[in-house]
Amino acid sequence: MNPLNRLDLYKQMVRIRQYESRILQEYHADKKPAWDIGAGLIPGEMHLSAGQEPSAVGVCANLKQGDAITAPHRPHHFALAHGVDMNAMTAEIYGRDTGLCHGKGGHMHLFDPEHHFSCSGIIAQGYPVACGQALAFKRTGTDHVAVAVAGEGAANQGAFHESLNLAALWKLPVIFVIEDNDWAISVPRSHSTANASNADRASGYGMPGVRVENNDVEAVFEAAGVAIDRARAGGGPSLIEIHTVRLWGHFEGDAQAYRGADLDTLDARDPIPLYAATLAEIGDLSMDQVASIAADAAAEVDAAITFATSSPFPTADDALLHVFA
Amino acid sequence: MTSTETPTRRITTAKAMAEGIALEMRRDPAVFVMGEDVGAYGGIFGSTTDLFAEFGADRVIDTPISETGFIGAGIGAAVEGLRPVVELMFIDFYGVCMDQITNHMAKIHYESGGNVTVPMVLMAATGGGYSDAAQHSQCLWGTFAHLPGIKVVVPSNPYDAKGLMISAIQDDNPVLYLFHKGAQGLVWMEKNPRSIAHVPEESFTVPIGQAAIARQGTDVTIVTLSLSVQHSLDVAEQLVGEGISVEVIDLRSLVPLDTETVLTSVAKTGRVLVVDEDYRSFGLTGEIAAVIAEHDPTMLKKPFRRLAVPDVPIPYARVLEQAVLPTRDKITDHVKELMS
Amino acid sequence: MTEVPFPMMSEEEPDAEGVVGTWFVNHGETVAAGQVIAEVQVDKVSQDVEAPVGGVMYQLVAEGVGVRQGDPVARID
């Protein structure tokens, strides 16, 4: 397990939040007065991870270069926490030729082979792929691990169940992360899932499972550390369910009429001010540091937006490239 | 001031299809709806607008993200006499439930020697044009039309959306109902005015297996479906000014395919362009070419033409996506080349 | 003559602009009281607007053009 570095955890979370906040702003800026999903410099769907920073940061703080992550349609926090280049990622979101995928993939299909990071928009389908990456690591004798990320809704998809069995059966170095943010678009967990905790399902499949409450980045860090160490040492897979919070809509443009009184609880559950208060109380974080960390993050995000918006678009003919190698 | 005019009622395609479901649910207690976010949310693309308020959670059921599970459950309910309307949120998600669709829903009637029926509607959103990229922008009707045992309907406008939905629910066969997201008339997506139209309030059917002549013409036949019908009609209006008379055939159904309407039109004009937002090779456009060639290739004054998405996944960036979709500009170019 | 206002949809931002996303009734057509005449949108939230009275309706704004909440969008004679 890596040593706990509280300040670093805080900085990473702030960096992600600054990023998501800026993308939120830019995404909507040119979709006024009529909100049109296909309009603007960032067209299409946008699924932001505000509130879910502890999950990504706590897990990734235990990873090293060469470890793999498959993420779902809401990928930015894991991408950033795992070291994906912010400029190239932003350029991809802006559909530019300098983007990770030359504008072919967009926000839901970010592929960074250098950091073994990928994401996709089909629920739970990153789970089997992560098993494959773990299989490769095991067969080639490295101590790398694969992390598969999905939401609590994904735990009811066939691929989830097949992956857990396969990983346990073949003792694959994979960590299954479930981000339980209570909502699968408009459907609350109580209406989709028979179990109270997916950690219970894990034991049914023959692997250890834990559920981390309170969106607590240090608790995530510790649970992930145990699971990752286990996998690296040849002990096989684990499942970690993290109870987190989706501060914004499922997608940008989601009016969330279905969410009711839950919306009123969100400010008090924002993990970043809560962690700042925790660190301040133990003397690990001063107000000056809060300000400078925020400023540094804002500057980095600003540079990434500038890089993206000044990058060239792909040309129409590029659409026919890269079907085959 | 008063008027003796009767108010015209115009609604969106989304509202029209939901209204079709509502009318059938009022008429027949065996009809119920299942799918993701079909309840309070009203369907991600408005397909179940207002149903939850009228019929409640007992008949409009939000499912977990378990397509194989709930589509299979729809099949089971149907074989036992209920009439489920099941939504697959995006047709692109077919990968996770294809076995239930093609090996069960489609084949049970045949495998049972006609003894078992599966009176089920599977509705799904299709189509691109708003940067939803490769896994959320496909049409795929060619894939499903190719596999025996499923009727496939694809409305292009509000009137047909309602009539085809009612026909689909009343049909004792499994019907795949594919609605184009860009033709739903949603305020939050760029829309063609043809997605808002007058629709009678009462129940009515549009026959499955019958194409419509959306616009009469004499010079060129465009055979098309879904949102491309709207685009083709726009092009046809534009080309009147250039002295070109375009006939637009709205297929409305792929299975059964109304070959007679297509062949009659091609016999009249001698020039045909098939416009299809699905992938080019091994699909609808090739099927129409084969139908014409088998019947009488000498009908054609000019070689057969097709405009479809080239054999590439749908890219994300707007410039790339527009390069692969069958846009109005491309339709216009093809028609003019047929006339040259 | 009755004016139909753009509804107050955002109480937190009363000055927020919205649009008429879709006109269901053409300029100069007859409407009945209670008939849905438009779908309006502020930010991500949309809702239907009904005719408060019957009569001949005239559109005061085009689709997609910014309108302040509370400003008239249609007139019914």
Image: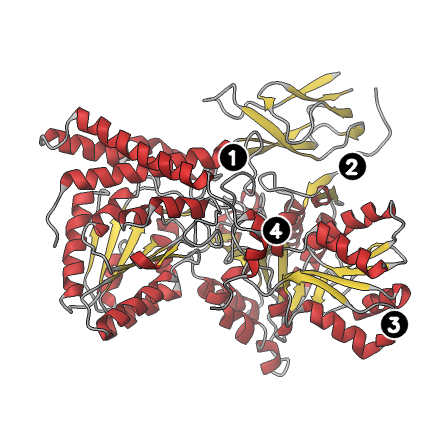
N-term-proximal mark, 2 vs 3: 2
Q: Amino acid at mark 1?
A: Lys
- In the depicted view, which residue is nearer to us: B293 or B99? B293
Residue receiving disc 4: B322
Write down the chain letter for disc 1.
Answer: C
Q: Residues within 10 Å of mark 2 (few under 14, many from 20)?
A: some
Q: CA distance from mark 2 to mark 3?
A: 42 Å
- In the depicted view, which residue is nearer to us: A56 or A242? A56
Residue receiving disc 3: B299
Q: Amino acid at mark 2?
A: Thr
Are discs 2 and 4 located on one and the same chain? yes
Q: Residues within 10 Å of mark 3 (few under 14, many from 20)?
A: some
What residue sits 81% from the left and 66% below the top? Answer: B262
Residue receiving disc 1: C44
Is B243 situated left or right of A240 in this image? right
What residue sits 88% from the left and 72% below the top? Answer: B299
Which image quarter: residue A297?
top left
Location of residue B324 in the rendering, given as x and y in whole percent from the top left corner: 61, 56
N-term-proximal mark, 2 vs 4: 2
Write down the chain letter for disc 2.
Answer: B
